[in-house]
Amino acid sequence: MIDTIRNAWKIIDLRKKILYTILMIIIFRLGSCIPVPLLDPAAMKEIFTSDNSLFGFIDVISGGAFQNATIFAMSITPYINSSIIMQLLTVAIPALERLQKQGEDGRKKIAQITRYGTVVLAFIQAIGLYFMLKSYNAVTNPGLLTAVVVIFTFTAGTAFLMWLGEQITEKGVGNGISLIIFAGIVSRLPSMAQSLYAYAKGGGIGLIGVVALLIMIVVVVGLVVMMNEAERRIPVQYAKRVVGRKMYGGQSTHIPIKVASAGVIPIIFAMSIMSFPSTIAGFFGVTSQTGGFWGGFLKIFSSTSWVYAILYFLLIIFFTYFYTAIQFNPIEMSNNMKKNGGFIPGIRPGRPTSEYISKTLSRITLVGAIFLGLIAILPIFINLGLGINNFAIGGTSLLIVVGVALETVKDMESQMLMRHYKGFLE
């Protein structure tokens, strides 16, 4: 492993890419320490400690920037939302679907639309965030000028992060946006370890409990890696065709269907819906401690509630099926195979093939959906059982960290193999 890393470091252009990526991540972490003018960080921490899982998730992926009221407080979430919206619109709008099939030029145009959408969503989110902070008395001097400064600072911070991620993707190693999220989540590891140590020292759990918790985290990481790489391969056989004096086809291949093909997108969708009531209530300064009807209503949608866990789990399963149905079209796959002379052994071409693919996809999606749901609600059971409210690395965070790490290693592996070096994983 050390020899392989040494060989990678000897490649001049690859070494430059690694150093450039590290430099961009350092800039991201430095920006996470620059406070936004006219905001009270203490009030921001109060909002963070309130039972709002959406803001807690934003704080985790921003590396604590939201809690500390810095310029990167909104992190890269507007870009994630814009990308998801564009993926859905690409399927729903024929013009965007044709644009996507135009190759590199079409993808560049879609990326440009995604950037504009990111800025618009960031501006809207910044407006809502300002009024929420104002209701929590987090704005030191409310007024028109203060609103303009805070809103445009939040928007500019997200736009800069988007640019930073694109620069990493273009000139560095791996996917820039994913690496920024990865760096934000990993930066919370020291605070999570400190919270766990303080809880154990205070008599919450003993040494055996800490060891058991760490073993459980390792097991969960192993399961995430296994499920992230697991796939169902549907065999496909192509018939032989004679054209002139040459014979074409006759080869065997497969259609890979990943078990967790939807990734963390269903979790993000479900989290947004479950956090919607508390987010809207936060704009008016209403919390679960307020009392009355709305206070009791918000307690049901608290991230520490059993009702929240059950609804959250069911929504994840629903959105996993929904997103998978958008990604895969069994009828189109069957028609493409039929046009190219391909067939699944034992299955007739045409409608029987599409039904077989649909049935297989449904079974695989169920396994992936249940896995995503269990991983997502795992931190809720940890909080209920141990009372560790600051357990920053939750199921969603683990999925992101493991997925980004695997993709970055694969990118490094492919670049090294192009230069006739041994694989990074060997």
Image: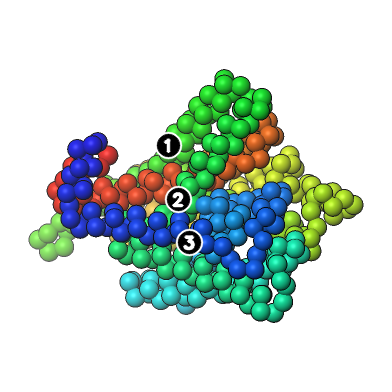
Residue type, numbered disc 2: Phe
Mark 2 or mark 1, which is nearer to you?
Answer: 2
Q: Which mark is residue 76?
A: none
Q: Which mark is residue 31?
A: 3
Do residues under tags 1 and 3 come within 8 Å of each other at their CB atoms?
no
Q: Secondary structure at mark 2?
A: helix
* Residue 387 locus on image (x, y percent): 68, 34
State the residue at coordinates (9%, 61%). Answer: 245
C-alpha span from label 1 to label 3: 35 Å
Task: Report the side of 134 relative to 362 (left or right).
Answer: right
Q: Is residue 286 visible?
A: yes
* Disc 3 crowd, CA 10 A, few/some/many (<14, 14-19, 20+): some
Viewer-proximal residue among 62 and 272: 62
Residue type, numbered disc 1: Met
Residue type, numbered disc 3: Gly
Residue linked to disc 1 = 226
Locate the N terminus and report the quarter of the image it occupies. top left
Residue linked to disc 2 = 182
Q: Secondary structure at mark 3?
A: helix
State the residue at coordinates (42%, 71%). Answer: 111
Q: Earlier in the sequence, mark 2 or mark 1?
A: 2
Q: Secondary structure at mark 1?
A: helix
C-alpha span from label 2 to label 3: 16 Å
* Residue 349 locus on image (x, y percent): 39, 53
Viewer-proximal residue among 192 and 92: 192
Task: Report the side of 288 relative to 228 (left or right).
Answer: right
Viewer-proximal residue among 24 and 377: 24
Residue reaching furthest bottom?
144
